[in-house]
Image: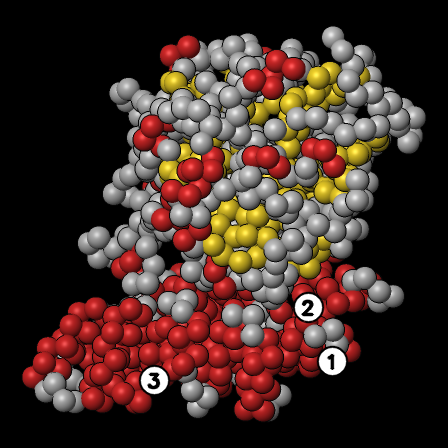
Amino acid sequence: MTVEHACVESCWGELRWGEWRRWASVCALAFAASCDGGAARPQAERSSAGGAWFVDVTAECGVDFVHDAGLSPEKHLPETMGAGGVLFDVDADGDLDLYLLQGGPMRRGGAEPGTFMEPDGNLPSNRLFRNDGRGRFEDATAHSAAAAHTGYAMGATVGDVNGDGHLDLYVTNLGADVLLLGDGNGAFVDGTADSGLRDERWTSAAMLFDADGDHDLDLYVAGYVQVDLARALWCGERKEGWRSACHPDAYPALQDRLWINDGRGKFRDATLTHGIEQSFGKGLGIVPCDVDADGDLDLYVANDSTENFLWLNRGDGTFEDGTLLSGVGVDGRGMTEAGMGLASGDLDEDGDFDLFVTNFDDESNTLYRNDGSGLFEDVTLLIGLEGPSRMPVGFGTVAEDFDLDGDLDLAVTNGHIIDNIQLYHDGKTHAQRSQLFENDGRGNYRELEAEAGAFGATPVVGRGLYSGDLDGDGDADLVLTQCGGRTRVYRNVRGDASRALVIAGLPEHARVELIARDTRRQLRAAGPQPSYFGACGREILTALPFTELVELIVRPAGERASRVALERPLAAGRVELRRAGERWSARVTAR
Amino acid sequence: MSGLFELAVTAILTLATQGPAAQELWNAGRREEAIEAWWREQERAPGDRSALLRIVEAELAVHRYAAALEHARGLGAEGARVRGTALYRLGRAAEALGELGRESAAELAMRVDAYELLQRFGEADRELAELARRTEGKSASVEAMLARSAVRRGDAAAGERHFRRALELDPVDPGALHGLGMLLRGGERKSEGLALLQRHREVTPLLDQLEFARRGVDLGPMHAANHAAVGDAQRALGRIDAALEAYRTADRLASGDALVPVALRHARVLAEDRKDVASAVRVLESAFERCGNAKLLVRAGDVLADAGERAAARERWTRALALRPQDAELRARLERAGGKL
């Protein structure tokens, strides 16, 4: 093995990067291979797509998943939520596989409000799709064992909870949640009972993250609301066809829960001891993010029609409520909004993490700009995101550099929760167009309509939206889950693959700065980003030309930053940044 | 914006005072049927522009904006306001600006918002100045808008001045509490900023409750209980005038036993918050005359007893007991007060 690029430097002297290993063989990877297994065809396809950024490859890529919302005459609120998905490398073969969550027939109410019973009969399961590395998927559910779970699922989060090197899943349900322990080859066992985790309420979003900096993944689970399915409320007008799902204001909120991992996958409930006991917020989105740059992961929680939470980490996994001073609990007019999906990232390229939340119609999505110290300002109106987001109901969202021009664009999928909303407002529809917003490099956004291509062309009842490089061409593709509809897969045909830089293998949610020869900097965070109810790919997909990269600064949660200087430009291909004794390595891929 | 809500409710209730036949359907809350009936009338007299305008107004009231826009095309200049409103509500800000005038505060507010959505902030500010002139510094929400505009321009001092004025007008204006708190949080007056943000946090659930109640009114504007819920929410926020207005509307719309909870709450605000015993008793007795429920007389007696008017209280309790002779609790109450059984 040849060390082609040695670069041993750490400004704090703690972590040294041992070697850069050039993997000559992976240069032969079929970059940009199409979903149908063909050879790379980026330029031609861009031309044929007429400047569109995305093409819909659902029909030919093997993902044939249709969500069953379990629609009922009672219009129970859970029917409106949809379910999420997870992009992760289930079999450690270097590509992103896809786990999709299923609803099924509506559950029956239990003896007490907020308890649930399974309906009779066969229930549809969550499904696992394996990627062949070129964006073609095969249904691997039959071999996934316990991952073929039949709870009425909501969301999921991914990570290695027991330190065995394999990725695990935690799935929230309308009813008992489940911890699925992976074997690294696509099969899972139900590890819930042994883990100490237990939650049988209606939970929504969940997030595995290292709360206390001890190198294992702790768990935050958002409780939603207490519904009584046995005694359904009637909302909407009392006319045939006009009944609608009730607003969440009609139900009491459930508390969020924090579970601390002992490093071996055993969890203890720390809700009442770690500062989040007041977390009754009807949460739907959770993003871990070091908003105040103090080296630990804070948590931002999007709540449905109540104040959002910002839990500031004290550094030891206990939290204090930072919502008030930070200004991210409500919008700039002081109004609560119906928070759904979340994205974080340095959207204005000023070296700190900003927050973006999708909301209900007649509100707007909200972008909170960070001043670097964890104080935020609602700049939605100023940067052009208010107007386009007033009418739709926003759900899943991702911040990615889709066009590989060096800044973070935004994609949002929309869809109303009321399936007969046109009766109540004839300008609104259940299915809505997804939206793509291009960043001008300074954090101002412009909606792309025709350029969004297939992504924005067809109305969907959008819920989850997850980004990741599905076809190995270095740019961010999209997976979109619908409530009661088919999951869509969109391939990015806009990104200039010659600029693509993929950084994989970093610890979850690590803060990464990339520094170019001309001193330009990019701040990025390793994933997975949550969007709505799920997880995007963990890799950083960015666009700094590989040959211009001179330095990386990596700061995993709870650790000091490591500075890595490159002595000379890197060539195209894939390199691995690894040092014996360290718990992680990074793989950098460029074309 | 809260002002728009009140204007919309007024428009709906105004419609409830117009026309025959179809009108009864409208008054009964059967709004879609009423609109159909108006259309049938319109077909018999197709040239009646004022009738057409009434239909379009009704369509706006039930959120049939696309239909209203289509039907208002034939109204010429007379229909500009309703077309503008429909376009605004359909999210078509640029087109709305071509139709909306400046005659009403509601139109001006929509113009401000539409310009802001288009990021034409200079024009938004000019419209806002006109709106401020029109509201003569008496609208908290307009003052909060002026403050946000000033902060956007970098004029923090003017922002603070307008936020404070808004809070003088409405101590729980969410935009002002939050905006001023945000303005002060980073400087030397951080503790004041935090106190404002804390106050904002305390009132936010109450504001959400109000918003929820307003959605009920929007859905069923002729249902008394929905207006009473708005009254409850306004009272919880300490906005007694607004609460009383909502209760009066509820009182007007309620009938039968549905009137009882409305009148009880209405009277409670008058007696407890306004210390206006006479008005409270008047509300209860008026309601009793309409529905004959003895509870109202009992409460009238309670209100009078609390005010030290024992004889008047006994008189109401006695009348109530005549209607509910088996009511042991009422009998005991009357005995304690020394009344005749």
Give the position of the C terminus of chain A as an image quadrant.
top right
What whole-number distance in Å separates the C-alpha atoms at marks 2 and 1? 12 Å
Residue A554 position within the rendered picture, expressed as x and y whole percent measured from the top left:
77, 31
Q: Is residue A564 visible?
A: no
Q: Residues within 10 Å of mark 3 (few under 14, many from 20)?
A: some
Asked if badges 2 and 3 are on one and the same chain, I answer yes
Residue B185 position within the rendered picture, expressed as x and y whole percent measured from the top left:
78, 62
Q: Which residue is mark 1?
A: B158
For mark 2, give the secondary structure. Answer: helix
Residue B190 position within the rendered picture, expressed as x and y whole percent measured from the top left:
82, 63
Q: Residue at x 60, y 50 (%)?
A: A356
Side (left or right) of A350 relative to A36: right
Compared with residue A172, is residue B290 higher up or lower down, i.e. above or below? below
Q: Which residue is mark 2?
A: B179
Q: Residue at x 76, y 55 (%)?
A: A371
Chain of the residue under label 1: B
Q: Earlier in the sequence, mark 2 or mark 3?
A: 3
Q: Residue at x 79, y 44 (%)?
A: A518
For mark 1, give the secondary structure. Answer: helix
Q: Nearer the viewer, residue A145 or A540?
A: A540
Q: Residue at x 46, y 44 (%)?
A: A53
Q: Residues within 10 Å of mark 2 (few under 14, many from 20)?
A: many
Q: Which residue is mark 3?
A: B80
| Residue type beneath disc 3 | Ala
| Residue type beneath disc 1 | Ala
| Of the two numbered discs 3 and 1 in the rendering, the one whose residue sits closer to the viewer | 3
Tell me the quarter of the picture where residue A579 sits.
top right
Chain of the residue under label 3: B
